[in-house]
Image: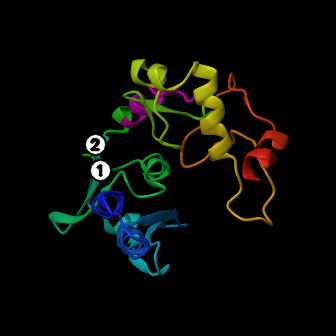
Amino acid sequence: MMKRFWRWLLLPSKKQISQMFRERLREMREISITAHGFRVEKLDDGSVEHDVVWRRLEDIHFSPEKLVLIRNGSVYLEIPNEYSGWYALVQQVPVGYPGYDYGGVKQFFASLAGCDVCGLLAVTSHKCLSCGSDVWNEQLAQEYATREAYVREKQLDLFEPSGEDETIDIHNCAEGGFPSDPAWRALVTEEEIRENMA
């Protein structure tokens, strides 16, 4: 009885998990580049929330946390870096906006390090901006026997296909605005991923 009480108190129900997932999905957005600008789409239903045309913007301001779009002398839209495709977008802003820090964007991407897990040049502040993995640290050293064991576990999860019909694709192809790290190598094989899926 007491065990059931603690489980009820500490673990959310399937219904609560489903509700949390739906709420989180409603908040998620994806940016897609178009011929004349970009779109911000809702991930839950695929609807276009904003269709932005570059020439209609007066100015754009960059910070590593968000883009601020100016139209008619005031803030038209703020786009946070949590949106999928944000890092690709900030590199696509056409030249000509006086408030846009083109040098700062270039410097930001030049400062990124390679991720041991996904193999993209996307690590800043001890975290990968692409796959979300933490850089090896003292806390992880207490949880895993070796750095290699940590990276292997994360790669097994990362490269596991989401559906049974999908093929296993171990790669570090440029993605989401992040280039691949030529020095990266996978520590897992397709066979190990298949075994992990079983």
Residue 99 image point, x, y percent: 24, 46
Q: Is residue 193 left or right of residue 128?
A: right
Boundaries of the magenta span: 105-116
Q: Residue furthest front?
A: 1
**Residue type pointed to by label 2:** Ser
| Residue carrying label 2 | 63
Q: Residue furthest right?
A: 191
Secondary structure type for disc 2: loop
In front: 58, or 24? Answer: 24
In front: 36, or 189? Answer: 189
- Placement of the N terminus among the 4 image quadrants: bottom left
**Residue type pointed to by label 1:** Lys
Residue 58 image point, x, y percent: 26, 61
Give the quadrant of residue 179: top right
Q: Is residue 15 left or right of residue 145?
A: left
Q: Contact (CB < 8 A) between labels 2 and 1?
A: yes
| Residue carrying label 1 | 66
Residue 31 image point, x, y percent: 46, 63
Residue 169 image point, x, y percent: 77, 48
Q: Going 63% across and 26% down the picture, which residue do you hit?
A: 149
Vertical side of 112 occupied by 190: above or below: below
In front: 34, or 16? Answer: 16
Vertical side of 160 occupied by 47: above or below: below
Secondary structure type for disc 1: strand
Q: Which mark is residue 187?
A: none
Give the quadrant of residue 142: top left
Label 2 Cα crowd, 10 Å radius (few <14 / some 14-19 / many 20+): some
Label 1 Cα crowd, 10 Å radius (few <14 / some 14-19 / many 20+): some
- Cα distance in 3D space between marks 2 and 1: 5 Å
Q: Going 74% across and 52% down the picture, which residue do you hit?
A: 197
In front: 114, or 91? Answer: 114
